[in-house]
Image (spheres, rainbow, N blue to C red):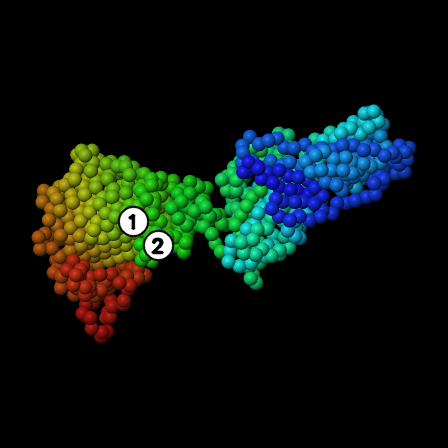
Amino acid sequence: MVVETRKFNRVNFYIVMKKVYHLLGIALLGAIALTSCEEDKIVNENTGGGNEADKNLADYTFTASIKQAEPPVRANMQNGVYAWNKGDAVTLWNRNLGAGYNFTVTSAQPGKDAEFAGKAAIENGYKLIAVFPQKEAKVFNDLTTFSIPDTYVQSGETAELAATTYMVATGEVVDNKIPALTFSPLTALLQFGLKNTSDRELKILSVTLESDDEVFPSELRIDENGVVQSVSGTRNKLTLDMGGQALAQNATLNGYMNILPTTYGDIRLMKATTGLNLTVRVVNGESEQDIILLKTVQVQELKDKVGIDMDASANQFAAGKLYKMDFDVDYRFKIPEEGYMIDDDGNVHIYNKKGLLGWNEIANQYRLATITLEKEYIDEPDGDGRKVIDMENELWKPIAAFGGVFEGNGVIIRNLNIEKKGFIDANTGTIRNLTLENVNFANDITDGAGALAATSSTSVIQNCTVKNLTANVKQTVVFGGLVGRNSEGKIDGCKLLSGTITIDLSGKAGNSNYGGLVGEHFNGTALIVNSYVGADVTIKHPTNAAGASCVGGLVGWNNSGKIKGCYSLAALEINCSAQTGGLVGANSNGTVLACYAAGGISGRVVNNTGGLIAQNTINNLDAVVTSCYTTTRITATNAAGNKLGAFIGSNTAGTNQCYFVDDVVTNGVGNGSASGIAKVDTDQLKGKKRQMNLAIEAKDPEFGFNFKVNDDPSTNLLQPLILQNAVKEPGFGGSDFGDGGDI
């Protein structure tokens, strides 16, 4: 008995059970070695010495047919049709005597009933059960138990399935004749079509089918009526050993595997969501390699992936059906159809827009995973070496919560149209090496938000960039060009290069915090370092009824956080009661070290306004503003009384080695302490470099950055000093001996 597959109605198939298995369009699949016995041998003698009936064997014949699977409801379902072939043999078990007899086909034609002949002892009313292939059964339980190995062997191009193509039939002796018997298949057949689409010959070692769960039985038992009663020994993996068969380029090799059904009665071993993996192991040249054909594909998705409509069998592998799957085999990596891949460690690899959107759908399941944008495979649309995923302004719903690692690999996500909140809503993980370009919030912002993340806590954001941001804030909520609220997190090497943030509260009372980079920077372990906001950033705050929002070029409100080695070149256009600072709106017990602002503040000032900080409240000796300067151009109309200062609008204390350059606003502080703050011109500021650097070193020896003179004439008027990797200053610490050597 073998299997012949033919295709009809484009997608339906039938199985023909023969001694030699055939497939449409290929040569014979090879002879099947059936266990054979002499026709008159009694297979079972459970009485030891036999009985009188056993000694009176007579010749009998019977007609056998095979029950076919019901026609599929859906056209794409695989349908099996079985037939006999000359040489097929079955075991006929006499339930009344407890004896088994071999019967062999005497005549058979494909697609028709067959006649079987053999010797048996029977009487009227005796109950019979027959199984294919014949079995050496000593007791009835041996006859009714069917096993499937963990590993199949297919040594050639043909199927080798004779030993595992199980069928059963029952009947009752009438008129001293064996009745016509109808055999029901007990197994399903999987056929894997492997086409070599690579550029060289491959050798096929094995094909492995694996599930997330233990759904493949190793043993099946039937009762005396031929009905499946149980399956046992479930496992999650089956392997077809193909022995290293050569597969030439563009050639196809079919692999075959009988499996016990995953359903019987009301039992369903698989779920619609059960994940299946299919891997082929090949020899590529001198090395072995695994090629993934299916990666965690849900059973219900097999229709889309390989054309098998599992709905027609309740998302199970059902007895009597052929499940034919064709695959391209290429040792070279091929981007999955989904646009992403989940590896064995549960990490997600993204290759394009579809993959990024696909990750969005499964992100909750993989919120602690490593997410990698695979730069090598991502398009380079501009031909300039930059790898870009173009979202084409398709609406992006924020990732609700993320605590893993997002590795951007320098890839640009372009034309990102965010529904609300940000690319991620709540981040507690690491996001690095990512650029968001042409970022737009599709709706007015009425909840806390940031282009990259609405909130980021106990996290790391490193080397991330936002470019060309458009955001309209319409409620008193926290907003930042990169992150809305940073709590106990580190932001390192990040920037907002360009964009417009409009805070239009339209008469709404209340206050909140808005920054070019971060709206609110909170808690003593929160750190922003080596980050900046570019000159092409405009922050507008035209209206509000009452309240005092905090607006800063870099940070709106620094509440006990640390800001080190940062600057802002943003233009702030204010016409309301916002506390407005070129770098920070309000600094409450926060540390600001080696920073500067060189943007502009225009409009109508009606609250604390400072070139660097609007309001500085320090009552913590560790929280000071050290070695900072501002060249912010303040052209705003002063309607704030004594709340306008070139460096700080309102200051309690805690400033050291701080300087401002402004010929319009000549007072460093609007009100409060001016200690440690001095007015200088550009050249004088350059001469303060050494003093400022020594103060940086004294404040934080491990910081790693300090100032150098800016020699670029296009920028050095507004940025006389720029940051560099720390270079130790000569001379005694805290003393000013110019740039001479040690003395």
Q: Residue at x 18, y 41 (%)?
A: 541
Q: Position of residue 565 (x, y in %)?
A: 26, 57
Vertical comparison of 209 with 270: above or below: below
Q: Are marks 1 and 2 in contact (CB under 8 Å)?
A: no
- Report whether 626 appears left or right of 271: left
Tell me the SS state at disc 1. Answer: strand
Q: Which mark is residue 437?
A: 1
Measure how far apart labels 1 and 2 are at the Cα level.
Answer: 15 Å
Q: Position of residue 128 (x, y in %)?
A: 78, 30
Q: Which mark is residue 180?
A: none
* Mark 1: amino acid: Glu
* Mark 2: amino acid: Glu
The tag earlier along the polypeptide, 1 or 2, is 2
Q: Residue at x 81, y 25 (%)?
A: 174
Vertical comparison of 315 with 586: above or below: above
* Residue under pointer 2: 380
